[in-house]
Image (cartoon, rainbow, N blue to C red):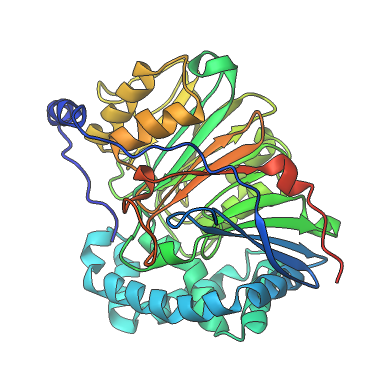
């Protein structure tokens, strides 16, 4: 389902580096054209970006609300056609992939047995029911709003929001600040190596949430298809995540009894004002599975990496970053992780590319000479400029698009979140 791990031998990784020096990479100027208005409804507006080309188009949705249902209903109404196409196709694919590759997902035995005996839908329904005790009801209300607005199956929408706990994804991340970047900017990477065979890339959406009540927090941007996977907030926080398949004894156990990680990320974007807010929330929240998270703060000019499980949590900066090994050295003003907790070849490649460009890293350099070289971010890649509040996003090639297949090879679209967070609702 996700990209296979490379060899765990750092010597192998060095030979791979030599091979990559001869590879040609796809890089063009960012698409920074203005969004094109498609239509509006009572609490939402639909735009399209990248319409000047045939190979890179993303839906941009703005939603306003007094509650989660308002958000969801506007979203579902605006994207009804896409959602009706998306749900059965993607659910069928994930169900088949999980059942056929269950042993390869490295799930806790109890969870593997539950899926094997009762099926994926049953397991996800159980998790949703258990999670109700820990989650804000507005999240479920939003999913119900999407279902009503699109006239779609609520159960399938809910299951797809919980499936990340099972499939996770082998991804890469970094946080760079101070001397590591050109001009001392705070930059963050979220490279998602997930499933490019299920059709997710046919429905890329960036959603801008505009709260009309205090209980919904502040404005934030979400890049995803279902749930929160990638995003930045109006308080200049960014999130990144890596699913852990190969952990060690520094991790704790895993559990269904807690808040699925995509909703932990969602809370950080929606409600945390500072890095300290986010870290305190992670420390106290009912966590679930093995992960690595990163939170960057453009106001403080720094980032932290979090080793995450149901029973344990550890926080790292550039001075105590783990795992500490010859294939994963520490770098001043940098946190970084490639593909997994124990994945020496990718970790070492990521280290080499950061060192090669150290002090000169910009979003353009990151796209051209970091993710393209380590080949991470096949489904989508986002680079956050947390200093200037700008997000650069690339999505894998959709069915009717042109150009390279994987997101890290493709053109990126620039989103000026200063503009998007300030955008006014269109009065109908």
Horizontal side, residue 44 vs residue 340: left or right: right
The quadrant of the rendering that contains the C terminus is bottom right
- Which quadrant of the structure image shows residue 286? bottom right
Residue 90 placed where, x, y %?
40, 74
Residue 150 vs 193, above or below: the answer is below
Outermost residue on the front side: it is 52
83 relative position to 199: left or right? right
**Quarter-wise, where is residue 295 in the image?**
top right
Quarter of the figure that contains the N terminus: bottom left
Q: Say which of 304 and 26 sits in front.
A: 26
Q: Is there any visible trace of residue 126 in the rendered image?
A: no
The residue located at (39%, 78%) in the rendering is 89
- Which of the 4 image quarters holds residue 418? top right
Most foreground residue, 305 or 354: 354
Camera-side residue of 395 and 11:
395
Position of 44 compared to 343: left or right?
right
Q: Position of residue 94 (x, y in %)?
A: 35, 72
| Residue 36 seen in the figure | yes
Task: Give the percent coordinates (x, y) of residue 314.
Answer: 48, 35
Residue 330, how many percent across, how many down? 38, 19
């Amino acid at each position: 389902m996700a990209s296979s791990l490379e060899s765990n031998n750092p010597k192998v990784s060095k030979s791979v580096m030599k091979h990559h020096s001869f590879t040609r990479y796809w890089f063009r100027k960012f698409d920074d054209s203005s969004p094109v208005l498609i239509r509006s409804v009572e609490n939402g507006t639909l735009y399209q970006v990248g319409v000047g080309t045939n190979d890179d188009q993303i839906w941009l949705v703005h939603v306003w609300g007094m509650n989660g249902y308002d958000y969801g209903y506007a979203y579902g109404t605006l994207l009804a056609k896409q959602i009706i196409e998306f749900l059965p196709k993607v659910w069928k694919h994930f169900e088949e992939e999980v059942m056929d590759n269950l042993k390869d997902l490295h799930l806790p035995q109890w969870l593997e047995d539950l899926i094997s005996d009762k099926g994926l839908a049953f397991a996800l329904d159980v998790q949703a029911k258990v999670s109700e005790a820990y989650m804000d009801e507005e999240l479920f209300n939003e999913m119900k709003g999407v279902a009503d607005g699109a006239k779609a199956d609520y159960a399938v929408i809910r299951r797809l929001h919980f499936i990340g706990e099972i499939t996770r994804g082998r991804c890469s991340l970094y946080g760079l600040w101070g001397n590591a970047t050109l001009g001392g900017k705070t930059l963050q990477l979220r490279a998602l190596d997930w499933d490019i065979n299920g059709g997710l890339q046919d429905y890329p959406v960036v959603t801008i949430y505009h709260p009309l009540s205090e209980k919904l927090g502040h404005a934030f941007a979400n890049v995803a298809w279902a749930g929160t996977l990638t995003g930045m907030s109006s308080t200049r926080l960014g999130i990144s995540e890596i699913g852990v398949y190969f952990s060690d004894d520094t991790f704790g156990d895993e559990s269904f009894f807690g808040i699925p990680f995509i909703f932990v990320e969602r809370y950080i974007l929606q409600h945390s004002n500072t890095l300290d807010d986010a870290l305190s929330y992670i420390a106290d929240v009912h966590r679930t599975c093995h992960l690595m998270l990163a939170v960057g703060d453009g106001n403080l000019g720094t980032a932290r990496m979090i080793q995450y499980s149901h029973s344990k949590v550890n926080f790292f900066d550039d001075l105590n970053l783990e795992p500490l090994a010859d294939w994963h050295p520490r770098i001043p003003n940098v946190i970084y992780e490639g593909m997994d907790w124990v994945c020496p070849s990718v970790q070492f490649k990521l280290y080499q590319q950061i060192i090669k460009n150290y002090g000169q890293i910009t979003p353009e350099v990151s796209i051209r000479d970091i993710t393209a070289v380590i080949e991470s971010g096949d489904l989508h890649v986002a680079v956050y400029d947390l200093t200037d509040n700008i997000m650069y996003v690339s999505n894998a090639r959709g069915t009717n698009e042109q150009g390279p297949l994987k997101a890290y090879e493709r053109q990126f679209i620039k989103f000026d979140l200063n503009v998007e967070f300030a955008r006014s609702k269109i009065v109908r």
